[in-house]
Structure formats: C-alpha cells, structure tokens
C-alpha cells in the first residue's frame, strides 16, 4: 500500500507540474497575442507634441556638423502617418520588449567583420532572452552607437580603480552609448561603464540590455524606437537620444537585417495622437 501511495503521490505531483506548465504557456500565448498589434492612444495632439519636441534640444547632422533641428526636420522624422507607409520605417514601431529567440549562430551573420562585436551572437542571444529584449534591435543599436564595433568605446577605454578615465590598465566597454552625454560623451560613457563593472564586451552587452529594458522598454509607451526617441506620452522628456534621426537610422538597419536573415518582426505597437 505504501508503494501504491507513493506512486499516486508521484503521479499527482507530476500532474500538478504539467498543469502549471500548461497554464503558464497559455498565459504567455495570450500575452504574445496582445503584443502582436498593440495600439496606444495618447492625450497630446501631434501639434502640442511637436511644440514640446522643439524645446527638447533636438539635433540634426548634415554629415559634417551637428546643428539644432528645425521644426520641419523634427516633423519629418516624427510624423507617424508617413512612417507607417514606409516598409523600413514601420520598424520604428517594432515592440522591442520581446525576444524572438533567434539562434546565436544566425545572429553571428549580422556581426561578421563588426570589430569588437564579431562572434558575440551568444552574448546578444543571452542578453535578449535574459531581459526579454529584441535581439536584432540590440545588435543594430550597438552597431550604430559603436560605428560598427570599431569606436573608442567599443574598443574599450582605460579607467583606473579610482574612476579616472585615461589612467590605469583595465579597459571598460560601453556598447550602447549609455551615459554618453553630449558635452563629453567618451569620458561620461567610460565612467558609466566603470561604475557598472563592464570590463568585457559581454558584460557591456548584457548590462546594456538590462538598462534599456528597465529604463525604457518596461514602459509600454517607450517600448519601440519611436517611443524611445519621441516619447509620445510625455514628449520632450526621458528620451534616449537627441538626434532627431536616431529612430530612423535604427529602423532602416533593423529592417535590412530582418530581410537578410529571412525573418520578420512579430510584435508591433502603434500610437495615436489626440485630435
């Protein structure tokens, strides 16, 4: 009888585990379905949002120098209706807060010949799955910020144990431009990397993904390139970049890489400004 009770108990526990697993899978499927085509209405009119962006120190580069962006330039890169019509720019609305679980070997195809980032497909896959962030976005964001893996921050900047940049013999890496404030981007980003302990490219990739998820993508309204750059719910505040074309450049590269890999974005979020 004891053996039978043990068997029955074992079967019960197994059944309970299977039931919990099925419930969790069902919940994930429901959540994924909601994220396939999420729509967010904001309280600001487009005009009022544009007015606020004009006060947010947006900049524009002609390829030679940076200048304050004009209202027309901001409007060009912020106009949702125009962006949605463009096959590449629609990726500005890709929901970045969801991994697509792309194989590391596949990701390495995007990293071949990309300086310090070469062969780091496993690092990007790990960061993506650990923090639930779109991996193709992570790669393209890093490529953009590091001049395809060859910038000074990508190669590593020495910082001593007191946090003094340019001294010591230990390098720190910042692959997403985090903390790279316009007044002194290299020093500020290197100090940030030092404070986070990013002394290897992998730590910078995984740590950077955590920062982006926590500070931006965890907010539904900022879980896209468009949301990170223009923050529709709070225009001009808490924006990832000052470059008015930041989302434009990222979307173009992401679309190109999805096509290169024969894949498509699965989750999208669109915004609707008040009338």
Image (tube, rainbow, N blue to C red):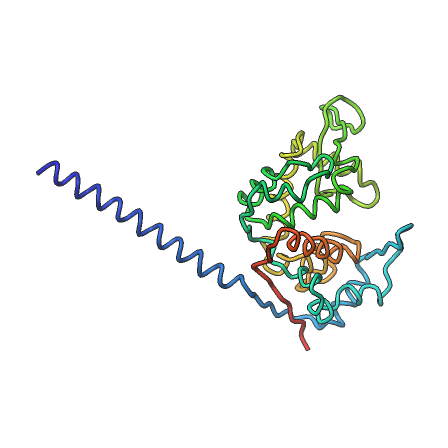
Residue 210, placed above or below residue 160 = below
Left or right of 64, for residue 24:
left
Q: Residue 227 placed where, x, y %?
A: 67, 59
The answer to which of 50 and 250 lies nearer the viewer is 250
Extreme-left residue of the structure: 1
Q: How many marks?
A: 0
Q: Residue 82 placed where, x, y %?
A: 74, 70
Q: Residue 44 placed where, x, y %?
A: 69, 70
Q: Residue at x 65, y 36 (%)?
A: 119
Q: Quadrant of residue 143?
A: top right
Extreme-right residue of the structure: 64
Q: Which residue is drawn at 60% across and 58% down?
A: 265
Left or right of 176, for residue 74:
right
Q: Residue 148 placed where, x, y %?
A: 75, 42
The answer to which of 214 and 223 lies nearer the viewer is 223
Q: Work out which quarter of the rendered image holds the C terminus and state it.
A: bottom right
Q: Which residue is drawn at 67% across and 33% down?
A: 201
Q: Work out which quarter of the rendered image holds the N terminus and state it.
A: top left
Q: In which quarter of the image is residue 149?
A: top right
Extreme-top residue of the structure: 169
Q: Which residue is drawn at 26% across and 48% down?
A: 15
Residue 51, placed above or below residue 19 = below
Extreme-bottom residue of the structure: 275
Residue 29, placed above or below residue 128 = below
């Amino acid at each position: 009888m004891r053996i039978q009770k043990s068997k029955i108990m074992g079967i019960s526990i197994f059944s309970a585990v299977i039931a919990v697993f099925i419930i969790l899978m069902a919940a994930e499927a429901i959540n994924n379905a909601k994220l396939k085509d999420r729509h967010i209405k904001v309280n600001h009119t487009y005009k009022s949002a544009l007015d606020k962006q004009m006060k947010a120190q947006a900049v524009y580069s002609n390829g030679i120098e940076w200048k304050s962006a004009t209202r027309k330039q901001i409007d060009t890169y912020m106009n949702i209706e125009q962006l949605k019509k463009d096959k590449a720019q629609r990726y500005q609305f890709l929901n970045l807060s969801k991994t697509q679980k792309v194989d590391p070997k596949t990701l390495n195809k995007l990293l071949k010949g990309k300086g310090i980032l070469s062969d780091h497909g496993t690092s990007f896959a790990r960061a993506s799955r650990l923090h639930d962030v779109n991996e193709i976005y992570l790669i393209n964001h890093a490529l953009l910020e590091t001049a395809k893996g060859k910038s000074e921050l990508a190669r590593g900047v020495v910082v001593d144990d007191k946090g003094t940049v340019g001294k010591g013999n230990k390098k720190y890496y910042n692959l997403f431009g985090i903390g790279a404030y316009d007044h002194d981007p290299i020093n500020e980003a290197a100090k940030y990397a030092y404070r986070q302990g990013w002394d290897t490219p992998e730590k910078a990739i995984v740590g950077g993904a955590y920062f982006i998820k926590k500070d931006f993508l965890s907010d539904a309204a900022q879980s896209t390139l468009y949301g990170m750059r223009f923050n529709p719910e709070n225009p001009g505040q808490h924006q990832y970049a000052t470059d008015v074309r930041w989302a434009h450049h990222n979307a173009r590269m992401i679309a190109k890489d999805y096509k290169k890999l024969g894949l498509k974005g699965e989750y999208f979020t669109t915004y609707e400004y008040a009338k």
